Image (cartoon, rainbow, N blue to C red):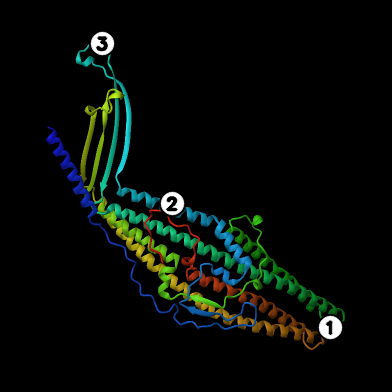
Amino acid sequence: MQTISRQFRRRQALACLTLLAATLGGCTVGPDFHRPAFDAPSRYGEIPPAARTVAAKVAGGAAQRLAPGADVPGQWWTLFRSPALTDLVTIALRDSPTIAAADAALRAAQEKALQQQGTLFPSISGLISRTRSESPEAYLGLPGPAPLFSAYDAQLNLSYTLDVWGGLRRAIEQQSAGAAYQRFLLEQAYLQLGAGVAATVVQAASLAGQIEVQRQLIGFEQKQLETVRQQFELGGATGTDLATQQAQVAQAQTALVPLQTALVQARDQLAAYLGRAPSEAAIPALDLDQLTLPETIPVSVPAALLSQRPDIRAAEALLHQQTAALGVAIAARLPNLTLTASAGTDAADVHQMFSPTNGLWSIVNQAVQPIFDAGQLLHAQRAQRAAMDQAAAQWRQTVVVAFQNVADVLAALQNDAVALRYALDAQTAAARGLSLAGLQYKLGGVSYLSVLTAQQTYQNTVITLIRARAARFADTVALFQALGGGWWNRDDLPPPPPGLLSSPLP
């Protein structure tokens, strides 16, 4: 009997080793992931941009040289040489709840990937129990009270799912791709927050400049009102001229109010980026003259954009996740092999638990094959394939939009530089025209209508010039954002947990 028992155990062990070998050498069902093929164009826009933008002799009007193939720095906002901007971006990236939420989502995804990796290993659990029971024996015709029984049980249980078809490995791949997806969502959050702060700083500085100019214009209009009033008293101006200038002053004062409102809202937006209430943010005063326009702009080659844009990489990771999920769906339709084993002891007294005569063990090899489920697993597989196709289409759309973004910003960078030069010429001419009109009006050479027209023209050109200056800075911020923001050159992101399967990064 002992010989037969030993042979039986050897056969059980051989069967386990055979199944384990089959698992290790088994296939992995489902398609392997590869980045979709995409023929990157040789340039972004329909028309190649000029190597250098035009210049204007005004602050923020320097010519910018495009450097094709140059790398984008990780802290691109420092190129504007503004301590206020650098401090605001640094605080926002450190304290923003948006970043904290994206970081927590990444850590959760990484832990889920590590959790899924544990499915490749056996699951072992221990059990210790004590049972006290009373079992009546009257039905056996035995007189007397029901006897009491005690039982002590100690077991060690093992369960191991054999990954013959690679379904578990595909599930691990799926979770790892999910972690990569969250990683690039975090990078996208960094990029959007940094660009949002920089763009809002430019906007707030522009509004502050417009408010200052508008106040100067109000002072000028009030002086003109005094001149017209004096002319009216001397008989050189009509009551209509006086009323018109009074309306002009009130109109200039009215135009100031929405600018002030917009500035308050821009500063409140900066406070929100910092993760603080407006009353606690302590935003410094912002001025366009505090910003320096970067004169050399790195422009990545189009082929590199596929690896640099966080939204493209996130879409790629999502496609990877859906591709691996298809392998999981296919494996679910195939036989599931599970090995379970247990060893322990069962005794009526705790002192007898470890007696050789009370030992027990079992080994069970189980194969489960779905036979009939009314097509549930088949349709689940087809649905997952459709989800994979959807993710592939979304990836292509993300790539197309990314190239559109860069092309649009490059065109704006060129055209807004030209617009700034024209705006400066217009403002210079309008200032000269207003000065001449005022002088001629005092001498009686022109009517007041000519002065009023010159005032309106000058007011419009001054505001347009400030907005044109701000557009140069905003375009530069938008280009850094469109090119991916240089996240691959940053080193402030914590490394993944030990044991996590690495995701493909540049």
Q: Work out whether 200 lies above or below 39.
A: above
Secondary structure beneath dot 2 equals helix
Q: Is residue 375 left or right of residue 467?
A: left
x and y percentages locating residue 249 in the rendered image: 75, 72
Q: Work out whether 209 lies above or below 121.
A: below
Q: Nearer the viewer, residue 420 or 298?
A: 298
Circle 1 is placed at which residue position?
A: 236
Which mark lies nearer to you, 3 or 1? Answer: 3
Q: Which one is earlier in the sequence, the residue at label 2 or at label 1?
A: 2
Tag 3: amino acid: Gly
Tag 1: amino acid: Gly
| Furthest-right residue in this view | 234
Write the residue at 44% across / 80% down: 46
What's the CA distance linking mark 2 and mark 3? 62 Å
The part of the image, by quadrant, that contains residue 166 is: bottom left
Q: Which one is earlier in the sequence, the residue at label 3 or at label 1?
A: 3
Q: Is residue 186 left or right of residue 220?
A: left
x and y percentages locating residue 6 in the rendered image: 15, 37
Circle 3 is placed at which residue position?
A: 144
Give the position of the N terminus as an image quadrant.
top left
x and y percentages locating residue 283 in the rendered image: 65, 61
| Furthest-top residue in this view | 143
Secondary structure beneath dot 1 equals loop
Tag 2: amino acid: Ala
Q: Work out whether 453 lies above or below 261.
A: below
What's the CA distance linking mark 2 and mark 1? 80 Å
Circle 2 is placed at which residue position?
A: 108
Give the position of the C terminus as an image quadrant.
bottom left
